[in-house]
Structures are given as C-alpha cells and as structure tokens.
C-alpha cells in the first residue's frame, strides 16, 4: 500500500526565547489577538482531504465503509454544514452523495453508501458552509483505490521453496528462497496492479526492478488469524513483450526463531508467497499472473542466511545477475511447491504505513581499538541497516558487527544482545569496491565494526552509513524548551519511538526479544500519539490483540502472542482498555472503542472473576517492572494492589466507552461496578488519613490510585502528601517502575505539588531521566542505570539501550509544561486546554500538534519583566486558556480590563478560582506581567 512519504522528524523548534524567570512572581495579563477567524472565506475550499485514519490518496485501501476528514481553510472560524460526494472513477457514477448535512463534523464522517468493493477506484470531494452560512467551493477531488478485501478475490496459490539437498546447511539456517516466473504481454497496457503478501517476508522484483520502497512486508500480525496484503501500481514497470517477476522470501517472524527461548517455526516451517499481478489493457481485457506451479525457485542465491536476530550472510560469488529479468536461464532451478488453501487466515489490505527507510545517518567518528577492526560511530543509537561502501578482496569475508555501546577500551559491547548474534557477513566475488546492505534482518546499534578488510586499508567516514528503519508514520507533534537536557530527553523519546515502532510496538530492537509487550505499550501510548500519527498503527495492533485474547479474557504479555497465550499481568493486560481509550481521546475516533469493546468487556470479566472482598486475588505478573532499589525486578507494590487498581481503572474505561457508544444500559451497569470497586478499594487499602493499609507503602500505589481517580478527593490530597513524604525519604527521587513512572509527574502536579514534579523531572542523579542523559544516552533506556561512568554496565540479562517505556513522561511535558492537552468531553482536540505551568529552571517551553483540524500550539517565554504566551487554535475548534491567577483585574486586553473588553463574555472563573477564556480559532498572544507572589497558582 502506498502512503504519502514524509520525513520522520519535525523541526523541533518553535522559535521560543527566554531569559531568567522569577518563578511565582508573574501575573498581570495582556491579551492580544494576532489573527482572528472573523473573515468568512466563502470562496475558499476544504483542504488536506484524508480517508480513514489519515490516509492520503491510498492505493490498496482496506475499509469498505470508510470515514472522511478534511481541514477548513485558514480564515474560517467554523463549519455549520457540509456536503460530501463519492464517485466511482471507472463507472463514472456517484456511489454516494450526502446532500447538505447540518453538522460541524469535519473528521471521521462516515460513508453512507453501499459498501465499497475490491479494486474499486474512487474520487471524492467535499464543500462546507461557514459560520455565516456561506458555501465554499468544492474541494480539489481526492482519490483512493481499494485493495483485495477478501480471500475470494485471490485466484493464486501459496507457493514455497521445495526441498533442496544442501549438505553444508544447518537445519536451523534461515535460508532465503528466490522465486521467478516469466510471462508475455501482447496488448497495450492501461494499468497494472500487483497484489502480494507472504507468510514470512518478501521483496518483489519486476523486470529487474524492486517493486515499491517498503521493507519487512507484509509485517507481523497474528498470522494464524490475519495476514496483511500490499497493493502496488506497476503500470510503468510492465512492458509489452516478455516480462519477468522475481521474489525473495525470508523466514522473518513467521518461520524464523522468535524470543529468547530460541523457538523456531512458531507459525510455520518455511516462508510462502502469495502474488497476483492484474494487467488491464486499453480494451478492458484483464491478464492475471498468479503465484502457482508455473514458478521456479532456488536456495542457491547470494543471501545464504537472513535472520532477524542473528543477521545476514551474503556471498557475492553466488550472485545471479538478471535473475528477475526475462530470458534468465533458470533451468537448474526447482519447481515450487504449492498450497491452494486460502480460507484462513484472513487476507486483508495492510491498514497502516509499512516500514521504510526514513533517514540516513553519517559516520561521526572512526576508531581502531584492535588491529584490523574499525569501529564507526554514527553518533545516535538507531534501528535499521548499515549501508557499507568498502574496498574488498576476492573470496575475502568481511564481518560487520553491531553495538549500542562500547567497552571502556573502545571495543564493541554486545553482551546485552544476549543470544542474538546480530552479525552480518559479506564475501566478495572480486577485488574492488562494493556497496551493500542487508535485506531481511535489522539491527539496533550506534556503532558498526568492520573487519576482514584488505590489509593496509585506510577507512573513511563514507564507508558506513546508517539507514533508519521504522513504520513510516507521519510526525505530528514537537516540543522544545530553554533547557538543553530537557530537549535531549525529547530527542531520546522520539528516537526510542522510532526504533521500537517497527510494524508493532516492540520493547527493544536489538536483543533476542523485540516483542510487542503490552505493559510498555499502554504506558507510552499517549506520548506516542503526540509525537507521531500512530492512530492506524495502534488500531492494527489492537486487532492482533483481539485475535490473541484468551477465552477467559486474559490478554497475553506480548502481541502478537508468541509466549503461548500467557497473560494475567495487571497493567500489561490493561493495554486492552487503556490504548483504545487513549487513541479515542486524541483522535475522536469512536470506531476504535466499538472494535475493541467486547475485548475490554472480556478483560473486565476476568478481573471480576478474580475479585473478592475488595481485592483481586490469585494474580501474578511483572508488577511495577524494574522499580529502582526493589528486591527484585517486579518491584515492591504487591500484585493484589496493582490488580485491584487496574481493575477499577479498566471497568471505568469500559463504562466511559459504553457511554460514548450510546450503550446506556452497559454504561450504567459498568459505572455501578466501577463505583463499587472504587469504594471497596478505598476502604480496604486506604485509612481515613489517606495512608496505605493492608499493603506496603509504595510510590506507585499512591500514584495509580490518584491518577486513576479511584479514591475520594479528600483522601487523594492526603494520599498525595504521603507520596511526597516517600519521595522526600528517597532524597527527592522516584521509586517507580514501568507502571508508576508514567503518572508520577501528573499526580504531583494535579495535587498541588508542581515544584516536586519539576524537581523529580530535573533530577541529575540516579534514578532519573537526566541521569541516563548524563551517561551519554541518545535513546530511552530500559533501566535508569543501564550504564554509568562510575559502575559500568547494568544487569546484562535485561539491559536494553533502546526501550521507550520511561519516555512516557513526554505526555506531562507536552500537556503541562507546554500546556497543550485534549479535552475528554470533546476528544480529538475538537476542544482543548491551554494551561501551562511555569516552574523548574525553565525560561521557555512550547509544543505544536498537527491535529485533524489543523495546527494547535502553546508556547511561552520569559523576557525578564513578563511572560509572553502564544496560543494557536485551528479552524472548527475551540480552546480554553487557563490563566494561573485569581486576580481578574490583572488580566487586560489592549489596556482594558478583561471583563470590560470584547472578551468579557468568553471569560469564566474555574472552581479553583482561576480565570479562563474561551477562544475560537486564531492566534493569540498573552503578556503576563509581574504582580504579587500570592496571585500565582
């Protein structure tokens, strides 16, 4: 499937400036609207039309009843009605016309026509009426084309490499199969579509050229239930006359080894290909080239082995020039084996962006810690491929090793890769200079070591480049501040996400694991949604979660489940409720709640079955994973406490989801269940002073009870005081693992302990976010002390240097330091809040987010005598700015007191006494002038 190609990184700069700020001594406010949406743009038209979860003119679309979204042109305050038309391009007829609909909805507008069909080509357009009732022009039409929506559309067979005798092959070698077929084309070509997938990994070539730019296709799903397919436009690659198709098949996740247990062939024994090339001629006739017994195959190609964990072995002496061109001599190749069973698993077009190379890193430094072993430092821990351009000698094998860190002597530190070999080998066919990169493996690394080079070689920086790989998701958010280490933390968060969003949300990209751990994912989801558009990414992963949920409601520890349906870990299982709700909150897409509603209910049912006398019992799992100073990896918070907290949270999410979906009976039922669990939880675990009882006091227990709003407001305040006491006893440090850390700053902030929240964030000593940065981190680490200058490397059994879970603090940075947060009552940033907090050592901060409606932004800077604050509200949305003061007379617009200005009707006072202003679309600037200290809240 083709998607609009975009660079991964946004420019992380909002142009903020700042000098020193006298915290808690600024407040008078001058409001200046820079640009207002007061001019009706009746001649303008909707822009940036997308289908479904943000697809720009997709080819091979997956949803027969899609939704449509568009943005209003700058200058339009709001939409009051719309008309949307969808036409079939080939039939030249309308398939749906909404007529004029009185609605301000401009995102996820549901298709109301007959469900679309496979191969159908559509064109759609939209127009709207603005706040004054003036109609816009029709938008420029947008196009999309359906993929093959059903297994019945496939007239092909699964084909795979037949047995070859190779006495030198290890029984567990992950061999790469080469397959090919020639075919003639006699007529003039109008269009050609290639539909393709694999059990395993594939690359397809047509007349000697690779089809598409995607990697690791079709991706990793619950293969027994669903396999994604891809669609490519190959009209320009097919030619009249003789043609040839070629394919390479790698074992990948399907048939290669998975996990630290070294299990092989988890889903199947060998990779298989399913392919269908459909050529439509000018006269309308269609020629179909299918994968069938007419194909031939061999294992005797240059890629001898390619393993996700262990690396790739390439022997250039085995190269087969022209193997995917017509007229290649394949007489020594074998006939393929075939299987015509297409009933299961379900074959569906891939519903999110594939993996691609998105950036190239250059070598920053070269060393030679051992004679003949050259180490190339790319300056950034990354995930992807090396691209080597090196001199070689005939028959000489070059060894390419990878590492995230170096030993003190400059040699490669690879112990943390555990059993993953992560080594590539290249054997030269002749003396000269070669350019090469692997195909069906990927590595997590910062350093590349080359050995086996010609004697006397002098390395240069252009010998090694890093090709960065991940799912090609659109960047949507950025954050920047006046503090360089905080900016480095943001860079580490983003690089951690890039490295671990390779078709699924993995826990690490380098060692013998790389699995979709559910606990890590639910913790990081809100942060992930801000930085990149992973809406469709999460929806696909949740579908695999539904496929792999056990019959009793448990969610496996990893998705796709390669641990034989293990599950039952509180906080890990709850990805089933937390991820759908967080995606809904940030997109407004109700469909994600509807799709996963039954899964949520089954999980809550599992908790209910294990609940008695106010406690969830008979549970185990990973606890508050990797809590510092705990006696073991699962932390000090008992399983029963965590399970009861997450049960209460998940049943509340289920009740909320039922309410959103209009399931009122369910909403009432689950709401009562949530209230009952909260009451019993409060009575059992918290005394009248808000102190934990019947369980050891831990930071995480207090944090989750407050973050999930499980105890009454008075006891929340008391519990927060006990939390602060525990932090003080820890010398101002956190004592939280994967479950408690995402919420610690939020909880301290919301309970009036902002200064403690800033102090925890800006700590320089262990354990803290800046501690790893001080040790040289360029990504998030699995442990706060995965490495230290003083003590060296951490526990080698569990020591990833690219592990995004602790990057969940990004949510608080974006939503409170910068101040840009969604409103659960109007999700998807239809309405949002701007409520930054000024604290810590910062003199400026800001965030931008490209929402479905347009750019929303909040930024502030201190100039010495005032704080300048700029707010951007996109068309068709509103925002509430919360001023950190109770002094109404201190807020002025153009020198006029706010409640006497044109904004008087938009002004309110919150329950906490703070002044708020409701804003329509536009760009606004506020000047907060210095006033009395007690005015600031």
Image (cartoon, rainbow, N blue to C red):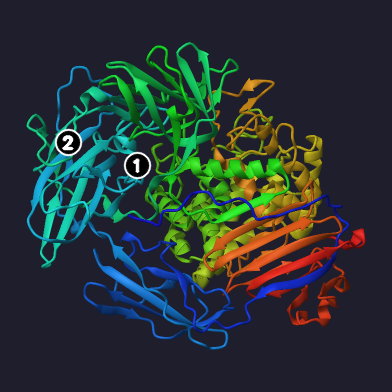
Give the residue pinned by disc 1: 216
Identify the residue at horizontal 73%, vertical 67% (top origin).
925
224 relative to 477, above or below: above
Nearer to the camera, 926 or 668: 926
Nearer to the camera, 639 or 392: 392
Look at the numbered disc 2 and give the secondary structure of its residue. loop
Q: Which mark is residue 323?
A: 2
Quarter location, residue 328:
top left
Q: Residue 683: tell me if it is visible.
A: no
**Foreground: disc 2 or disc 1:** 2
Residue 536 x/y as whole percent: 43, 56
Q: Could you give the CA–CA distance between mark 2 and mark 1, rounded to whole angstroms?
A: 21 Å
Q: The N terminus is located in which quarter?
A: bottom left
| Image side of residue 399 versus residue 344, left or right | right
Looking at the image, the residue that sits furthest to the right is 932
Residue 670 x/y as whole percent: 55, 63
Q: How many marks?
A: 2
250 relative to 197, above or below: above
Nearer to the camera, 54 or 240: 240
User: Is tag 2's residue or tag 1's residue first in the polypeptide sequence?
Assistant: 1
Residue 145 x/y as whole percent: 29, 64
Q: Which mark is residue 808?
A: none
45 relative to 508, above or below: below
Identify the residue at horizontal 66%, vertical 50% (top origin).
480
Looking at the image, the residue that sits furthest to the bottom is 133
| Image side of residue 310 versus residue 641, left or right | left
Identify the residue at horizontal 19%, vertical 59% (top origin).
153
């Amino acid at each position: 499937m083709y998607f609009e190609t975009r660079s991964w990184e946004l420019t992380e700069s909002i142009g903020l400036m700042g000098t020193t700020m006298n915290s808690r001594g600024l407040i008078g406010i001058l409001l200046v609207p820079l640009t207002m949406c007061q001019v009706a743009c009746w001649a303008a038209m909707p822009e940036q039309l997308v289908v479904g979860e943000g697809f720009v003119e997709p080819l091979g679309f997956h949803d027969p009843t899609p939704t449509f979204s568009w943005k209003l042109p700058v200058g339009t305050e709001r939409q009051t009605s719309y008309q949307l038309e969808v036409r079939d391009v080939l039939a030249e007829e309308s398939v749906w016309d909404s007529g004029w609909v009185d609605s301000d909805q401009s995102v996820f507008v549901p298709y109301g026509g007959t469900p679309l069909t496979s191969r159908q080509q559509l064109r759609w357009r939209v127009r709207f009426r603005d706040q004054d009732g003036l109609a816009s022009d029709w938008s420029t039409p947008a196009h999309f084309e359906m993929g093959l929506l059903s297994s019945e559309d496939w007239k092909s067979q699964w084909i795979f490499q037949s047995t070859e005798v190779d006495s030198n092959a290890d029984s567990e070698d992950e061999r790469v199969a080469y397959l090919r077929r020639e075919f003639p084309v006699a007529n003039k070509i109008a269009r050609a579509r290639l539909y393709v997938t694999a059990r395993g990994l594939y690359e397809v070539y047509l007349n000697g050229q690779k089809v598409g730019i995607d990697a690791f296709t079709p991706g990793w799903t619950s293969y027994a239930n669903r396999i994604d397919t891809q669609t490519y436009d190959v009209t320009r690659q097919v030619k009249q006359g003789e043609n040839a198709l070629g394919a390479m098949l790698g074992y990948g996740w399907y048939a290669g080894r998975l996990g630290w247990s070294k299990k092989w062939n988890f889903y199947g024994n060998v990779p298989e290909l399913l392919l269908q090339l459909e050529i439509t001629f000018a006269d309308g006739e269609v020629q179909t080239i299918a994968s069938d017994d007419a194909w031939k195959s061999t294992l005797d190609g240059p890629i001898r082995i390619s393993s996700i964990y262990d690396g790739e072995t390439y022997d250039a002496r085995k190269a087969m020039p022209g193997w995917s061109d017509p007229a290649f001599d394949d007489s020594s190749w074998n006939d393929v084996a075939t299987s015509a069973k297409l009933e299961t698993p379900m074959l569906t077009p891939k519903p999110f962006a594939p993996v691609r190379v998105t950036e190239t890193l250059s070598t920053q430094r070269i060393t030679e810690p051992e004679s003949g072993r050259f180490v190339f430092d790319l300056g950034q821990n990354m995930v992807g491929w090396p691209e080597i351009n090196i001199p070689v000698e005939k028959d000489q094998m070059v060894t390419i090793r990878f590492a995230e860190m170096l030993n003190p002597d400059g040699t490669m530190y690879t112990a943390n890769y555990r059993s993953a070999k992560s080594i590539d080998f290249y054997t030269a066919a002749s003396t000269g200079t070669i350019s090469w990169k692997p195909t069906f493996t990927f590595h997590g690394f910062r350093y590349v070591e080359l050995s086996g080079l010609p004697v006397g070689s002098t390395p240069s920086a252009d010998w090694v480049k890093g090709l960065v790989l991940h799912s090609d998701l659109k960047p949507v958010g950025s954050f920047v501040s006046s503090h360089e280490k905080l900016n480095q933390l943001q860079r580490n968060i983003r690089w951690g996400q890039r490295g671990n969003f390779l078709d699924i949300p993995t826990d690490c990209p380098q060692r013998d694991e790389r699995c979709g751990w559910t606990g890590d994912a639910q913790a990081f989801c809100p942060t992930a949604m801000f930085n990149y558009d992973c809406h469709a990414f999460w929806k696909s992963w949740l579908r695999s979660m539904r496929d792999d949920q056990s019959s009793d409601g448990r969610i496996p520890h990893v998705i796709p489940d390669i641990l034989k349906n293990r599950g039952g870990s509180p906080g890990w299982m709850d990805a089933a409720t937390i991820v759908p709700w967080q995606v809904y909150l940030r997109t407004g897409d109700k469909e994600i709640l509807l799709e996963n509603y039954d899964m949520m209910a089954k999980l809550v049912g599992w908790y209910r079955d294990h609940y008695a006398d106010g406690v969830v019992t008979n549970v185990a799992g990973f606890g508050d994973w990797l809590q510092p100073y705990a006696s073991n990896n699962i932390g000090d918070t008992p399983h029963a406490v965590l399970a009861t907290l997450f049960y209460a949270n998940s049943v509340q999410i289920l009740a909320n989801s039922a309410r959103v979906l209009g399931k009122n009976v369910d909403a009432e039922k689950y709401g009562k269940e949530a209230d009952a669990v909260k009451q019993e939880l409060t009575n059992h675990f918290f005394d009248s002073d808000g102190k934990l009882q019947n369980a050891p006091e831990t930071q995480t227990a207090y944090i989750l009870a407050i973050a999930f709003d499980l105890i009454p407001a008075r006891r929340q305040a008391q519990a927060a005081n006990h939390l602060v006491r525990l932090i003080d006893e820890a010398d101002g440090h956190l004592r939280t693992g994967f479950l408690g850390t995402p919420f610690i700053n939020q909880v301290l902030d919301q309970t009036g302990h902002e200064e403690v929240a800033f102090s925890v964030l800006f700590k320089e000593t262990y354990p803290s976010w800046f501690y790893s940065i001080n040790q040289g981190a360029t990504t998030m680490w699995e442990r706060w002390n995965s490495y230290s200058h003083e003590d060296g490397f951490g526990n080698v059994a569990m020591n990833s240097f690219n592990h995004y879970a602790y990057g969940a603090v990004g949510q608080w940075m974006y939503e409170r330091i910068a101040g840009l947060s969604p409103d659960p009552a109007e999700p998807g940033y239809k309405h949002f809040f701007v409520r930054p907090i000024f604290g810590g050592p910062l003199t400026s901060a800001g965030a931008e987010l490209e929402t479905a409606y347009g750019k929303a932004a909040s930024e502030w800077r201190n100039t010495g005598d005032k704080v300048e604050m700029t707010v951007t509200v996109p068309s068709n949305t509103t925002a509430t700015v919360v001023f950190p003061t109770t002094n109404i007379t201190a807020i002025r617009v153009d020198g006029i007191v706010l409640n006497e200005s044109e904004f008087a009707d938009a002004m309110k006072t919150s329950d906490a006494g703070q002044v708020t202003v409701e804003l329509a679309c536009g760009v606004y600037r506020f000047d907060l002038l210095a006033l009395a200290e007690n005015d600031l809240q």
